[in-house]
Image (cartoon, rainbow, N blue to C red):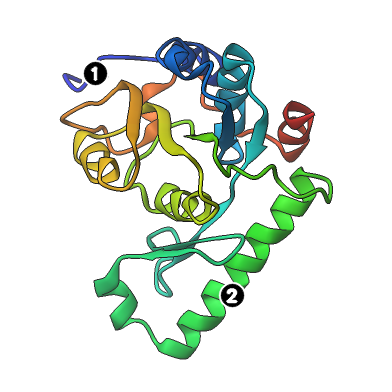
Amino acid sequence: MGDMPSVVFRNRVDAGQQLAALLQRYKGSDPVVYALPRGGVVVGAEVARALEAPLEVVIARKVGHPQSPEYAICAVSASGSLICNETERRAADPRWFEMAVERERQEAARRQATYLEGREPRSPEDKTAIIVDDGIATGLTVRAAIEEIKGQEPRQVVVAVPVIPRETAEALKRQVDAVVAVDIPDFFLGAVGAYYIDFEQVSDEEVIRLLH
């Protein structure tokens, strides 16, 4: 083996509790927690509870490569904030690209409506927006989520995750006020799930339950 993670979380609740302990300084700063579904909502619920903050969702969808859909070339948020790997974007057929982005944007908007049961998400204006996921690898989807939140003029934006590779963390620091993580490994194991003992899929029902 040899490549054992330095930090292992029992599950997303454990990860959320460890992360919340690092975020106590934001407790009095009028925070709103914006979690990326689905897994991020379980982590975000623990953070929101500890900070006595409202829990919201922010949704960004990967736009997969036409030949290999798992490989993201862009990410788009519900309102259309778009972050791309520019090299891949330029190589893609423009008509295909436009349709793919619009399809994912609509899916993001549909999920947001489902999770929030039709209500509008709380605005981060003049508040501390804390964007939470269950872990970040490349950071494409979280960057689209950051743009979505920043467009609504929060006082500050914090990205908070259990685990993020060092180079991704450094890149995100240029986009937000702070990046807070339990573990920032120099050598990332390639998948967020490698840092969890239990990394089961989270259901839509669970997300909706946590948001209430």
Relative to 115, 156 lies left or right: left
Quarter of the image that includes the N terminus: top left
Of 172 and 104, nearer the camera is: 172
Q: Residue at x 58, y 44 (%)?
A: 125
Relative to 89, 155 lies left or right: right
Of 46 and 194, nearer the camera is: 46
Q: Name which quarter of the figure residue 208 lies in.
A: top right
Nearer the observer, disc 1 or disc 2?
2
**Relative to 192, does residue 80 appear above or below in the rendering?**
below
The amino acid type found where label 2 is placed reads Glu
Q: Residue at x 33, y 32 (%)?
A: 178
Element marked by disc 1: loop
* Callout 1 touching callout 2 (CB < 8 Å): no
Q: Residue at x 46, y 80 (%)?
A: 97
N-term mark: 1 or 2: 1
Of 168 and 32, nearer the camera is: 32
Residue 4 tag number: 1
Residue 102 tag number: 2
Q: Name which quarter of the figure residue 99 lies in.
A: bottom right
**Relative to 62, does residue 145 appear above or below in the rendering?**
above
Give the class, few, some or many, for how many residues have Cα within 10 Å of label 2's Cα (few <14, many ≥20).
Answer: some
Q: Residue at x 51, y 12 (%)?
A: 17
The percent coordinates of residue 83 (x first, y second) are: 39, 63
Of 200 and 57, nearer the camera is: 57
The percent coordinates of residue 10 (x first, y second) are: 48, 12
The amino acid type found where label 1 is placed reads Met
Relative to 193, 171 lies left or right: left
Element marked by disc 2: helix
**Relative to 190, does residue 30 appear above or below in the rendering?**
above
Q: CA distance from mark 1 to mark 2?
A: 40 Å
Residue 197 tag number: none
